[in-house]
Amino acid sequence: MRFAMTLPETPASLALQENGLLRALVHATYWLDDALQAYMKAHAGLSLPRAQSMAMIYLTEGVDRPADLAGKLKVSKQATRKALEGLQAKGMVELTVDPNNGRQKIVSFTQFGRGLGLIAKRGLSELEAELARRIGLERIENLREALDADWGLPPDMEDTIPRSKVPAGESEANR
């Protein structure tokens, strides 16, 4: 059964319902990724499917084990393995046996992959500058500040839904 949490009717809650922060964040992420892929196609001769592009973000941050990468991406280990196989087939990464645990692999960039990473960094810098021209530097700075703020752990939404809002015929345990 579908359940929709209702917000009190305030100007702020109406704006949230109409625009949706999650929708806006996803839209912005896809805008940046699509633009980066177009940049990479023009300047490096290749672009990546979204799954491989998202994996690259965490790999550049130092996440180097497939299981950890799957956790960061919130996808299955099989989906992560497929993305890594694609990056490996392109010559961007290599997987080697972890010397501390022979059952695990370590992902590292190849020289080609590191070179593409530099092109991508330059591309992202140019895209951020273009976005600043389009929407204003102050908005970019405010957005970065808001996104970089410590949001804390995600709240347990089960505890935020009033008991009176449980749909008829559905027990709280099934929510």
Image (spheres, helix red, strand yellow):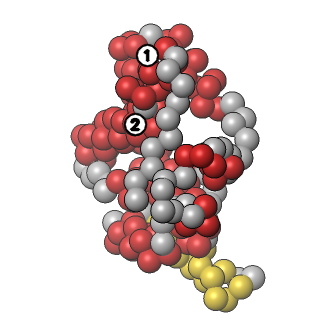
Vertical position of residue 156 compared to residue 132: above or below: below
Q: Nearer the viewer, residue 80 or 113?
A: 80
What residue lies at 67% left-to-right and 89% top-to-bottom?
102
In the picture shown, does residue 62 fall above or below 84? above
Residue drawn where x is 69% and y is 37% of the image: 151
What residue type is disc 1 on?
Ala
> Total label count?
2
Residue drawn 42% across the image and 63% down it = 92
Mark 1 or mark 2, whichever is nearer to me: 2
Can residue 28 be seen here? The reply is: yes
Q: Is residue 130 above or below residue 113?
A: above
Q: Secondary structure at mark 1?
A: helix
Q: Quadrant of residue 84?
A: bottom left
Q: Earlier in the sequence, mark 1 or mark 2?
A: 2
Graded by Cα atoms within 10 Å as few (under 14), some (14 to 19) or many (20 or more), the crowding at tag 2 reads few
Percent coordinates x, y for residue 80 in the rendering: 46, 70
Judged from this view, the residue extending furthest toward the front is: 168
**What residue did someone put label 2 on?**
23
The C terminus lies in quadrant: bottom right
Q: Amino acid at mark 2?
A: Arg
User: Is 18 on the left or on the right of 65, as rendered?
Assistant: left
Does residue 115 appear to the left or right of 89 in the view shown? Answer: right
Image coords of residue 48 (percent x, y): 32, 55
- Kindly tell me whether residue 111 is visible in this rendering: no
- The answer to which of 132 and 74 lies nearer the viewer is 74
Vertical side of 113 occupied by 78: above or below: below
x, y percentage for residue 166? 54, 52
Q: Local crowd at mark 1 within 10 Å, few (<14), some, or many (≥20)?
A: some
Give percent across and percent down for residue 16: 47, 26
The residues bearing labels 1 and 2 have C-alpha atoms spaced at a distance of: 21 Å
Q: Which residue is mark 1?
A: 132
